[in-house]
Amino acid sequence: MKELYSLQNGTDIRGVAYKDKNSDLEINLSEIEVCMIAKSFAKWLKNKNKTSYISIALGMDSRVTGPKFRNICAQELVKVGVNVIDCGLATTPSMFMSTILEDYKATGAIMFTASHMPYIYNGMKMFTREGCLNKEDLKEVLDICVEANLDDKIDDIKSNITERNLIDDYSNELKEIIKKGVDSKDNYNKPFAGMKIVVDAGNGAGGFFANKVLEDLGANTKGSQFLEPDGHFPNHIPNPENKEAMKAISKATLNANADLGIIFDTDVDRAAVVSKYGKEINKNALIALISSIVLEENPGSTIVTDSVTSDGLGEYIKLLGGVHYRFKRGYKNVINESIRLNNECINSPLAIETSGHAAMKENYFLDDGAYLVAKILIKAAKMFKENKDVSELISELREAKESLECRIKIKNNNYKEYAGSIIESVKEKALEIEDWEIVEPNYEGVRVKSNKNNQQGWFLLRSSLHEPLLVLNIESDVENGSKALFDNISSILKSFDLEFPK
């Protein structure tokens, strides 16, 4: 039973759910584990809420194992006295909203997803009205799995399964937000009239956005692609960080002569966009774009990002009159830090990671790719009427000439402590190298700025959140500067028990 703990990946459950003949990986997340965890979540909710009435909403992305997991969990939860709201194909953000929306107000929600991971994987993301379970909460759920008898009914009450179309209801919420945001006097109900907007859903759960949101609001979505759910992801990985995926939406945007391109990850908690000129707006550029919108609404506020954001982004946020607060990698880390700042009366309306996870104070600090895109679309619609493109908002963003990421394997068994000693050693060495300076404040690993003529950039060396790896991020403003920095850092690391990628 204790092997269940190995399925925890931060705030999610993740595991191999499908046996592929071309893979050596064995299934470790089957209907058995999924049902045990779901029933444990129900008991955890009962204990937390001190109530006999428990309702849990269930939803899934397009993964091939999603239907069987959703169906078996619904049946097993009803057996133990849980009222189930079956939402079918859904998105991760909409599943959180099932605990908030007036006609749902579920006690908790479970989304079956493994984000952008290969199709053989699946997982579970659990929510209450306070948001996604944090890792401590999820550990408590797994403790119940390991220690408790899960066959008892939660209470002697009648329970049932109710089917609901959450995506339709969620789409209606988004449409109202967009209509009010654009506030078009001449065409309130069709704020995107005359605009051509294409969507690439990567065969994940985001295809709804094209017809249930954009088309209903007047947009022409011809040229959109991979909208049909297909858990094998036959066209490209649904991931805004993936180069192939970004090239696909960029090409589609140009081919359709569209005003904007949109791409979602599998479960729509992340997104990126492409300008009418084919410019990929993701990572630092996406943060800059949404920051410009948020800072217009919240002058002088603080934007919290992860640790690997660029120097150019910091300069840009400062140019807009905002404060750039660079924190740790991990979207929950970023969100929780933004919440903490607000609790200390520091206005922080946006928490965003370079991966595309973006959460806003005005939207429950929910990392929601569709809501992020809605905010961008509101601004894009207003600019369209002035014959302007949304990419003009970030025309003054200084982007690095080169960048690279290197994941270095730690061969020492006690890898967490070993990683810490390596980072401390790099800090000491950096102080001795001419034209290198340690960047402070820095909340993760060691960040160094180089003013050497052949480097002109920065690097961040940090420990991976979940794996025995050191992650090295480098950016440079000169040609071959990344290589020069990499060679310099490699010479420092050569005495340690590490394995560099080939």
Image (cartoon, grey):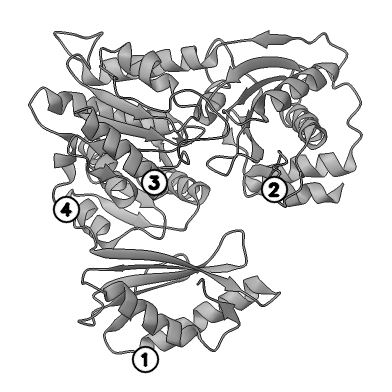
Where residue 451 sits in the image (x, y, percent)? 23, 79
Residue 466 visible, this angle: yes
Q: Could you tell me which secondary element the residue under label 3 belongs to?
A: helix
The residue where tag 1 is placed is: 432
The residue where tag 3 is placed is: 244
Q: Could you tell me which secondary element the residue under label 2 belongs to?
A: strand
State which quadrant residue 224 falls in: top left
- In whole angstroms, how far apart are the C-alphas of marks 2 and 1? 41 Å
User: Mark 1 or mark 2, which is nearer the start of the sequence?
Assistant: 2
User: Mark 3 or mark 1, which is nearer the start of the sequence?
Assistant: 3
Q: Could you tell me which secondary element the residue under label 1 belongs to?
A: helix
Q: Could you tell me which secondary element the residue under label 4 belongs to?
A: helix
* Residue, far left: 386
Q: Amino acid at mark 4?
A: Leu
User: Mark 2 or mark 3, which is nearer the start of the sequence?
Assistant: 2
**In the depicted structure, whether residue 389 falls above or below residue 71:** below
**Residue positioned 50% across, 27% down in the render:** 205
Residue 15's disc is none
- In whole angstroms, how far apart are the C-alphas of marks 4 and 2? 41 Å
The residue where tag 2 is placed is: 8
Residue 319's disc is 4
User: Mark 4 or mark 3, which is nearer the start of the sequence?
Assistant: 3
Where residue 450 sits in the image (x, y, percent)? 28, 78
User: Mark 4 or mark 1, which is nearer the start of the sequence?
Assistant: 4
State which quadrant residue 183 falls in: top left
Residue 347 visible, this angle: no
